[in-house]
């Protein structure tokens, strides 16, 4: 986005006009609102991501527990252990990379 000085660099006298000053003021207000909306949008996405990751981890832990119970009581169960371990490592490493602290 161009700054006001860039736009009026060849006609600085136009900045003295009241209509131009009103327009500049209005544009500055809009820029502030855009920045605020982008921040809120990012923050909401982060919260949604955190909730999703927490639920995936809970699901993985529940499957891991179920797998241990099947092994303990001698039932045949699919081997989810390596998949769960990989998924948990992946989620935790991504959280560290993105600086998202979930627990």
Image: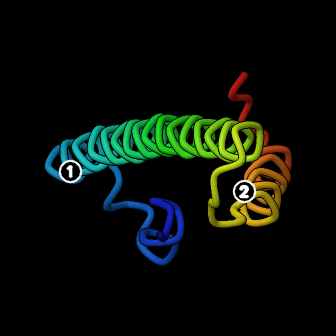
Task: Identify the residue at image location x=45%, y=59%.
Answer: 4
Q: Position of residue 84 (x, y in %)?
A: 72, 56
Residue 95 bears which disc, if any?
Answer: none
Q: Residue at x 22, y 53 (%)?
A: 20
Secondary structure under the numbered disc 2 in the rendered image: helix
Query: In the image, residue 92 lies at what x, y percent?
Result: 80, 46
Q: Nearer the viewer, residue 27 or 102?
A: 102
Residue 54 occupies quadrant:
top right
Residue 23's disc number = 1
Q: Which quadrant holds the C terminus?
A: top right
Above or below, 10 against 29 in this view is below
Residue 86, image quadrant: bottom right
Q: Is residue 56 above or below residue 9?
A: above
User: In front of the other: label 2 or label 1?
Assistant: 2
Instruction: From the image, tell me which residue sits under label 2.
Output: 84
Badge 1 density bin: few <14, some 14–19, many ≥20, Cα 10 Å: few
The outermost residue toward the bottom is 10
| Left or right: where 14 falls relative to 70 | left
Residue 101: x and y in percent read 74, 29
Q: Is 51 drawn above or below residue 88 in the view shown?
A: above
Give coordinates of residue 51: x percent, y percent.
Answer: 48, 35
N-terminal of the pair, mark 2 or mark 1, is 1
């Amino acid at each position: 986005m161009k700054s006001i000085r860039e736009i009026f660099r060849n006609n600085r006298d136009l900045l003295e006009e009241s209509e131009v000053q009103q327009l500049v003021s209005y544009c500055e207000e809009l820029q502030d609102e855009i920045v605020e909306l982008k921040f809120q949008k990012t923050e909401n996405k982060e919260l949604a991501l955190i909730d999703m990751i927490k639920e995936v981890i809970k699901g993985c832990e529940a499957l891991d527990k179920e797998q241990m119970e099947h092994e303990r009581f001698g039932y045949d169960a699919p081997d989810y252990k390596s998949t769960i371990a990989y998924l948990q490592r992946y989620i935790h490493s991504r959280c560290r990379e993105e600086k998202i602290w979930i627990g």
